[in-house]
Structure formats: C-alpha cells, structure tokens
Image: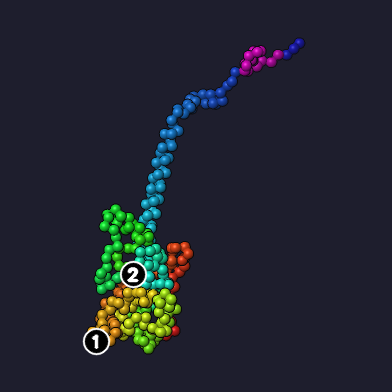
Amino acid sequence: MTDTTDSSEPQSEPGKPEPKVSTADATHPDEAPTPDPEPGDEADGDEPKKKSALRELAILAVIAITLYYVMLTFVARPYLIPSESMEPTLHGCSGCVGDRIMVDKITYRFGSPHPGDVIVFKGPPPWNLGYKSIRSNNTALRWVQNALSFIGFVPPDENDLVKRVIATEGQTVQCRADTGLTVNGKPLKEPFLNSATMMADPAMYPCLGSEFGPVTVPPGRLWVMGDNRTHSADSRAHCTSIPADALKGILCTGDPMTGTVPVPNVIGKARFIVWPPSRWGGVGSVNPQQGQ
C-alpha cells in the first residue's frame, strides 16, 4: 500500500512555466506599485538644485565682498607707489608701474608713528596746492579707475603720500652743511639713503639740498622726508621761511605747522611690498635716531 500526502501548493502542469509571484504584492497587498518616472521629471527636479546653488554662490560672493571692504577700511589696504621719492626703499615713477604696498591701518589705532616708520598719509592743505585729479574725464573710464584704485591697482584720486618719519612732536630738526641732518642737535644714521639713487653723496652734500631749520615739531604732528632726498617734495618743501633766512638759503624757519603732518592724517604704516613678485618683502622701519 502506498501512502499519499496532501499539498496545499499548486502543482505546475508538465510543459508549462511556473507562475511568478510578486514579493511586494505578497507582502503588502494593499500597497500600489510605484510608477516609473515620466520623461522630463528628472530635469524638473534639477532646477531647484541649480537655483539653490546659485543662491549660495551669491550669498558667498556678498560675504566675501563685505569682508574685503571691512579689511580695506579697518585692517589693511593696498596702495600703488606713484613717484620715485622713496627710492630705493620703494620703487615708483610717474606714469609707470610702481611697487604695490600693503598698509597696516591697525597699528596707529593703538599708538603713534615713531621715527623711521614709513607711513602713508593724506596731504595737509598746504601740501595740496596745485594738486590735479588723475582721473579721466570719461565717466565710464573714471568709474573703472575708482574701482581699480579700491583694490590698489590705480593710485587714489587724492593727495596720499608716502614718506619716512624723521622727527616727532617736541623734537627739533635742522640741517647744516657742517653738521648734516640732526634731531635735537644729534646727527642721524640713515642707512636707507643711496648715493647712486640720489645722484649726490651725503658726505659731500650733507643736506642734499638747501639748509633748513631749526624746526621744532608742534604737538600732534610729524616731520617727514623721502628716502630719495634730491627728488622728494617733503616737509622741507612745504614749511614757511623768514624772508631774511630765505635770502641766506636757509629754509623752514617760519611757521612749522605748514611743513609738518598732523598725526590724524596718517592712514597707516607701510608693511609689505605685495607686487611685483620680484619685490616681495617687508618695508623696514629703521630708526635714524637709534643710538642717540
């Protein structure tokens, strides 16, 4: 006798394929199948992503511009050297590409300039006489020049000057052929002068120009001079003289206010040469009064 076993599973008929059963239908009979995406749906989904990316880029650009503006206003700013008055420390010439320097605007918020510092300052009223705008008369070109000036590729359209501090408030500066340049009666040591640049030897021409002084620097003001003494319109060129002394060839014996620079006019201290790459390096602050 042969035993038989009942089975609940359907038996496939010979010669016919077994039926396939959907796992999703078996597990979740009430769940509708996910339809295939229609053509164009993926493009519609990418559009919001593109808009979000553009919005993020715009926000980052605004933040970068704001931070750069804050840096230029309160921290540091690039300046283009427009003349040769600070050769060989800083290269520059009228109508050519000079050094671009980074000016530290923080240091003098917590202190005053010292002898030997190379500073950028706004020319006082007596220094602005005869100054002419360097901007184009074309409105569009002038706008471009102002924008490039903001990032230091074009000189600012104002009488911003670069000189070295020689004497500070209360100090008396003068120059005579027999003693040379002195502060409080003591000769200075100025290794930043270069005879070849000035085309004059300080040993033979101690004043590198006319004799001047004595000038006592008023409170809150500075006496400044260029390193290229024979090509620098500095404190010597702007101070007044008593007529009798002027006839003797001695300058700057009158009002000292006209030849000195107010400390509040100082924009900052020259720290680095940032362009051209061949000139990268710091701007030295050599105190000419050292050892006095």
- Quarter occupied by the C terminus: bottom left
- Quarter occupied by the N terminus: top right
Q: Label 2 belongs to which residue?
A: 161
**Structure colour scheme:** rainbow
What percent of the width, then of the height, locates residue 257? 27, 78
What percent of the width, then of the height, locates residue 13? 64, 13
Residue 289 appears in the picture as rendered: no
Residue furthest front in the image: 199
Amino acid under disc 2: Leu
Q: Residue at x 38, y 85 (%)?
A: 180
Amino acid under disc 1: Ala
Question: Which residue is at the front of the view, 38 or 234?
Answer: 234
What percent of the width, then of the height, locates residue 122? 31, 69
Q: Residue at x 29, y 56 (%)?
A: 142
Of the two numbered discs 2 and 1 in the rendering, the one whose residue sits closer to the viewer = 1
What percent of the width, then of the height, locates residue 41? 43, 31
Residue 155 appears in the picture as rendered: yes
Q: Pointer 2: residues within 10 angstroms few (<14), some, or many (20+)?
A: some
Q: Residue at x 32, y 68 (%)?
A: 160
Q: Secondary structure at mark 1?
A: helix
Specify which label sits upstream in the sequence, 2 or 1: 2
Q: Is residue 16 above or below residue 186?
A: above
Q: Label 1 belongs to which residue?
A: 244
Residue 68 part of the magenta segment: no
Q: Which region shows up in magenta? A: 4-18
- Is disc 2 in contact with disc 1, using a CB cutoff of under 8 Å? no
Q: Main secondary structure of the magenta part?
A: loop
Q: Residue at x 37, y 60 (%)?
A: 153
